[in-house]
Amino acid sequence: MIDTERRPVAVSDIAELLGLSVNTVNAWRARAAGAKQVEPFPPAAGKVAHIDYWWDTDVIAWAQRTGRLPPTQP
């Protein structure tokens, strides 16, 4: 069964989820501020204790759309 529940993720969670470093995720976030030719990193969904979070499904979908993560196989 496919788990479709959205989970909040912080930068370190995103890095682990995509198999990358925290520095890479932070670079994507910084680049998003002035992005014109590429789809920017999704905006944070909110904050908990002054820490930004995103929905894991939004980040995964963005990573797939932008070629940073291969699409899932049916």
Image: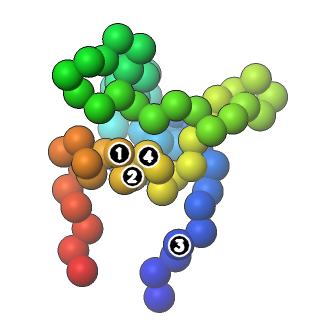
Q: How far apart are marks 3 and 4 (CA)?
A: 14 Å
Q: Residue furthest top?
A: 34
Find numbered disc 4 in the image and state the secondary structure of the residue it sits on: helix
Q: Can residue 32 be seen in this view?
A: yes
- Locate residue 45 relative to residue 71 in the image: left or right: right
Q: Distance between the residues labelled 2 and 3?
A: 12 Å
- Marks 4/2 in contact by CB < 8 Å: the verdict is yes
- Locate residue 47 relative to residue 25 in the image: left or right: right
Q: Which residue is drawn at 27% across and 51% down?
A: 64
Circle number at residue 18: none
**Residue designated by label 3:** 4
**Residue designated by label 2:** 60
Q: Which residue is drawn at 53% across and 43% down?
A: 13
Find numbered disc 1 in the image and state the secondary structure of the residue it sits on: helix
- Residue 58 % position (x, y): 47, 50
Q: How far apart are marks 3 and 1 (CA)?
A: 16 Å
Mark 3 is on which residue type?
A: Thr
Q: Residues within 10 Å of mark 3 (few under 14, many from 20)?
A: few
**Residue designated by label 1:** 62
Q: Distance between the residues labelled 4 and 1?
A: 5 Å
Q: Is residue 19 visible?
A: no
Q: Residue furthest right?
A: 49
First in residue order: circle 3 vs circle 1: 3
